[in-house]
Image: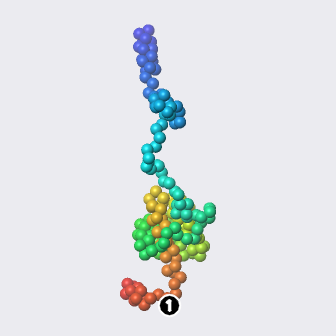
Amino acid sequence: MKLFVVMSAICLISSGCHLDMDDQPKYKPLSSSSFYHNGQSSRPLIEGTVPRGSVQPDEFLYTGKRNGNFADAFPFPVTHQVLDRGKDRFTTFCTPCHGQLGDGLGMIVQRGFPQPPSFHADSVRAEPAGFYFDVITHGFGRMFSYAPSVPVNDRWAIVAYIRALQMSRRIPISEIPDSIKTRLAESH
């Protein structure tokens, strides 16, 4: 009997301790309140407040698309500075799989990972610039999204560098300046 009384007391005491977070005093979104004079439970945003997440007013810059289709253009001029930045970001993020030349023979491929397509294959070269931007942003096949790691302008710089790699394979030797031919000969 004594055990029954003790167990009953423990049950009564523990049932009084309800630690459910849903029972705490709070207002649900968009509910009314008598606390503020206007009856709202939320305060208006302070002027100049920056929204959480990203505002994307320029569809082309942030998606690579115009009117829902991938564009074969760039949202800003491609300068030497943009190409240098693209090369730097390409080297950092892309060469492990795609290789220095964009041929799909990166270090992880040499270690047994499946080879990605070469940027120099005709079917890949035919894709518009916006397609490459979309792949970097959202991933494709085994490639994951680089949106969290690579800012928007850097993604476009990578695309510009990929285009430069693609063009470099199509320039006839006769059109390469002698100074570059000499420099290339000396490096090999």
Quadrant of the image occupied by residue 129: bottom right
Q: Position of residue 55 (x, y in %)?
A: 50, 54
- The answer to which of 48 and 99 lies nearer the viewer is 48
Q: Position of residue 181 (x, y in %)?
A: 42, 88
Residue at position x 46%, y 64% from top?
Answer: 153
Colouring used for the render: rainbow
- The answer to which of 2 and 10 lies nearer the viewer is 10
Residue at position x 37%, y 84% from top?
Answer: 187
Q: Position of residue 131 (x, y in %)?
A: 57, 66
Residue at position x 45%, y 16% from top?
Answer: 12
Tell me the quarter of the image containing the C terminus.
bottom left
Residue at position x 45%, y 74% from top?
Answer: 79
Amino acid residing under circle 1: Ser
Residue ID for mark 1: 174
Instruction: Look at the picture and state if 141 lies above or below 163.
Output: above
Instruction: Look at the picture and state if 188 lies above or below 130.
Output: below
Instruction: Look at the picture and state if 179 lies above or below 101.
Output: below
Instruction: Look at the picture and state if 121 lies above or below 55.
Output: below
